[in-house]
């Protein structure tokens, strides 16, 4: 430390680093920042000291601080705001993936989105039938590199439900949408690249991006909606390399993007020639889905059609529509990191879709979600929420009079035996944390327990002084 001591100098962060460690100093500094966040010494939103000031305090070269801050950005721990400085990310202290509750006692599950297994008798019936067939053993081998005609037919039919025309030259399969996201990011982006998404989004995107050293940038919202102006702002100010959007029932806010916005985004993507990852995980809960953004930007729109939420959670399968210019990179990455789906899952999906059995399963799924939404609206009258009658989740707003944070609400509700997810889990970068929690409507399969959970939620979140 230099002669001019910082002992009494007001700094938001005074890291303590083991200088005898063999770990490079910039990595040690980044690791220290992460530890200080997780242990509560630094809180989300805290503005870090200027890099030169921190370098003087630690008596190290400025370039070391710059490398450390860059690494922290790639890890999703901090975000820089032009003209304002570097801040601890709003979600830096939260868990990444959304998992089923770990409580030992009975908990009403309204967190992770888990479709009702009772609807899946058709799936298990087909599986039983396949097991008795003489060549079943072939499905226990590695999946073939090339897809057969029936698999391609099923994939094309699958995308027709979304309103997207595709062909065999655009089709790929992966082991679930999370692996599809990881594959696409690995194939098309490099460490240090930036992609843009909404201010709250699917945590799996953030986990995948952070593991690859890719920074996720939040979109500003103008007039309460995403516009080409929003996209242009981040592209110009952050050198963004691509986009990730969930136009149908954004996770977690449940927002449904209108057709004009889809056209506007596609027009901008076409202009900038940047890849757009369109996650359509909840689209098929809509009886008549709106045209996907990818249908308006065929050269740049990469669409992920997940199977698990609408068909069966056990089918860890996603169908990907990839434009020709990205196909080779994504295909090679998919096989090189071995996250292609098992042959058994591919065959099961192919039969259900090609033989028309999916239509009935989807119909039952849609009916269940509509009924669950009706119950929600009847019981939960004491607080505001967003979400469509066909949406399997609700974004519930915490009344100002409660004076609690979303993470506090998640913890206190779990203590009461109800699992929901707080806004902190979904927020991107240094975006303001919404006073909201996400509620899954289809995870608690026992109807009586679901109603009890809604009543307890209404009681807890009601706007009572």
Image: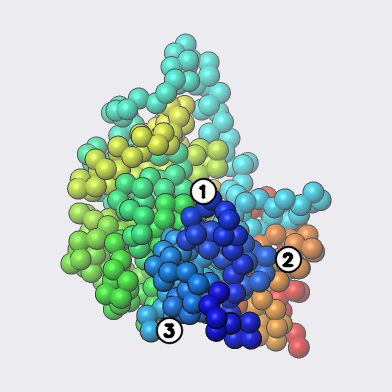
Residue 365 versus residue 34 in the image, above or below: above
Q: Answer left or right for 285 relative to 459.
A: left
Residue drawn 43% across the image and 27% down it: 343
Residue drawn 42% across the image and 52% down it: 212
Which of the two residues, 255 or 227, is positioned nearer the viewer here?
227
Residue 166 versus residue 168 in the image, above or below: below
Q: Secondary structure at mark 2?
A: helix
Residue that mark 3 sits on: 84
Nearer to us: label 1 or label 2: 2
Q: Secondary structure at mark 1?
A: loop
Percent of width and height locating residue 119:
58, 42
Q: Which mark is residue 309?
A: 1
Image quarter (top left, top right, bottom left or bottom right) of the C terminus:
bottom right
Image quarter (top left, top right, bottom left or bottom right) of the N terminus:
bottom right
Residue that mark 2 sits on: 411
Percent of width and height locating residue 403:
70, 83
Which of the two residues, 303 or 151, is positioned nearer the viewer here?
303
Please say if the residues under marks 1 and 2 sit with CB atoms less than 8 Å apart: no
Which of the 4 quarters of the picture holds residue 31? bottom right
Separation of residues labelled 1 and 2 (CA atoms): 26 Å
Q: Which mark is residue 108?
A: none
Separation of residues labelled 1 and 3 (CA atoms): 41 Å
How many marks the image carries: the answer is 3
Percent of width and height locating residue 397:
61, 76
Q: Secondary structure at mark 3?
A: loop
**Residue 424 appearing in the image:** no
């Amino acid at each position: 430390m230099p002669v001019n001591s910082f002992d009494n100098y007001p700094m938001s962060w005074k890291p303590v680093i083991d200088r005898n460690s063999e770990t490079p100093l910039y990595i040690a500094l980044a690791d220290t920042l992460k530890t200080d966040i997780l242990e509560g010494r630094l809180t989300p939103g805290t503005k870090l000291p200027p890099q030169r000031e921190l370098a003087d305090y630690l008596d190290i070269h400025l370039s070391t601080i710059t490398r450390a801050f860059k690494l922290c950005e790639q890890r999703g721990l901090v975000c820089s705001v032009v003209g304002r400085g570097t801040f601890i990310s709003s979600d830096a202290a939260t868990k990444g993936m959304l998992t089923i509750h770990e409580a030992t006692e009975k908990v009403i599950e309204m967190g992770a989105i888990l479709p009702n297994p009772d609807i899946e008798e058709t799936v298990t019936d087909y599986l039983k039938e396949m097991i008795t067939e003489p060549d079943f053993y072939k499905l226990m081998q590695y999946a073939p590199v090339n897809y057969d005609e029936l698999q391609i037919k099923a994939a094309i039919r699958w995308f027709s439900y979304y309103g997207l025309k595709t062909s065999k030259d655009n089709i790929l399969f992966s082991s679930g949408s999370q692996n599809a996201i990881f594959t696409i990011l690995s194939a098309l982006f490099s460490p240090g690249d930036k992609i843009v998404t909404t201010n709250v989004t699917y945590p799996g995107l953030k986990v995948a991006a952070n593991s690859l050293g890719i920074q996720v940038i939040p979109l500003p919202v103008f007039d309460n909606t995403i516009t080409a102006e929003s996209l242009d702002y981040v592209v110009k100010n952050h050198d963004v390399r691509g986009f990730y959007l969930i136009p149908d029932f954004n996770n977690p806010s449940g927002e449904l993007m209108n057709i004009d916005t889809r056209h506007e985004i596609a027009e901008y993507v076409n202009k900038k020639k940047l890849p757009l990852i369109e996650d359509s995980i909840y689209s098929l809960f809509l009886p008549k889905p709106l045209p996907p953004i990818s249908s308006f930007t065929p050269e740049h729109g990469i669409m992920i059609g997940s199977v698990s939420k609408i068909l069966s959670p056990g089918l860890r399968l996603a169908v990907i529509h990839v434009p020709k210019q990205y196909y080779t990179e994504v295909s090679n990455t998919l096989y090189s990191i071995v996250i292609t789906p098992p042959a058994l899952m591919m065959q099961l999906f192919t039969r259900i879709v090609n033989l028309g059995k999916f239509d009935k399963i989807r119909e039952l799924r849609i009916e269940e979600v509509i009924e669950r939404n009706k119950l929600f609206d009847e019981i939960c009258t004491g607080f505001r929420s967003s979400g469509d009658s066909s949406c399997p989740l609700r974004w519930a707003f915490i009344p100002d009079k409660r004076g609690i944070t979303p993470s506090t609400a998640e913890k206190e509700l779990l203590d009461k035996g109800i699992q929901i997810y707080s806004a902190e889990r979904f927020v991107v970068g240094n975006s303001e944390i919404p006073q909201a929690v996400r509620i899954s409507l289809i995870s608690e399969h026992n109807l009586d327990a679901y109603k009890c959970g809604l009543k307890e939620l209404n009681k807890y979140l009601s706007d009572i002084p």
